[in-house]
């Protein structure tokens, strides 16, 4: 079975088509990304104004704060020479 290599002309034509498609899709992607960011900002502002954070997010924030607090205590104890 022989394989024919495509001509330079056909490769250039295909590249032009693909480049045009890529540019069109990138424009659509940029628009959707900008809209998404705008909606995220609006949602965050509404939640902040109404103080409506999701319970899961509050739990995660509390866990992160307690972990940070424990790390700080452990670092302070090491610096002062105290053992855990």
Image (spheres, helix red, strand yellow):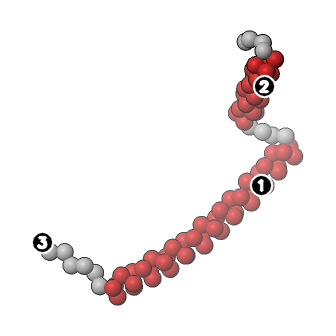
Number of other residues with Cα within 10 Å of mark 1, as a class: few under 14, some 14 to 19, many 20 or more: few
Q: Is residue 29 left or right of residue 3?
A: right
Task: Measuring from the top left, give residue 28's x and y in whole percent.
Answer: 59, 70
Residue 83 at x, y = what percent? 74, 11
**Pointer 2 residue:** 72
> Is residue 18 positioned above or below 57 on the image?
below
Which residue corresponds to mark 1? Answer: 41
Q: Residue at x 76, y 19 (%)?
A: 78
- Asked if marks 1 and 3 touch (Cβ < 8 Å), the reply is no
Q: Residue at x 69, y 63 (%)?
A: 35
Front label number (1 vs 3): 3
- Helix, strand or loop at label 1? It is helix
Question: Which quadrant of the rendered structure holds the C terminus?
Answer: top right
Q: Residue furthest right?
A: 49
Q: Is residue 27 above or below residue 65?
A: below
Give the CA distance from mark 1 to mark 3: 59 Å
State how far apart marks 2 and 1 are (Cα). Answer: 32 Å
* Label 3 vs 2, first from the N-terminus: 3
| Residue at which label 3 appears | 1
Which numbered disc flags the more N-terminal residue, 1 or 3? 3
Q: Position of residue 80 (x, y in %)?
A: 81, 17
Left-right relation of 39 to 46: left
Residue 69 left/right relative to 18: right
Element marked by disc 2? helix
């Amino acid at each position: 079975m022989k394989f024919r290599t495509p001509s330079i002309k056909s490769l250039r034509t295909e590249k032009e088509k693909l480049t045009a498609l890529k540019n069109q899709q990138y424009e659509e992607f940029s628009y959707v990304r900008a809209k998404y960011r705008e909606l995220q900002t609006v949602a965050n502002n509404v939640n902040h104004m109404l103080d409506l954070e999701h319970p899961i997010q509050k739990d995660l924030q509390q866990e992160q704060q307690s972990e940070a607090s424990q790390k700080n205590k452990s670092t302070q104890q090491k610096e002062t020479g105290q053992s855990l």
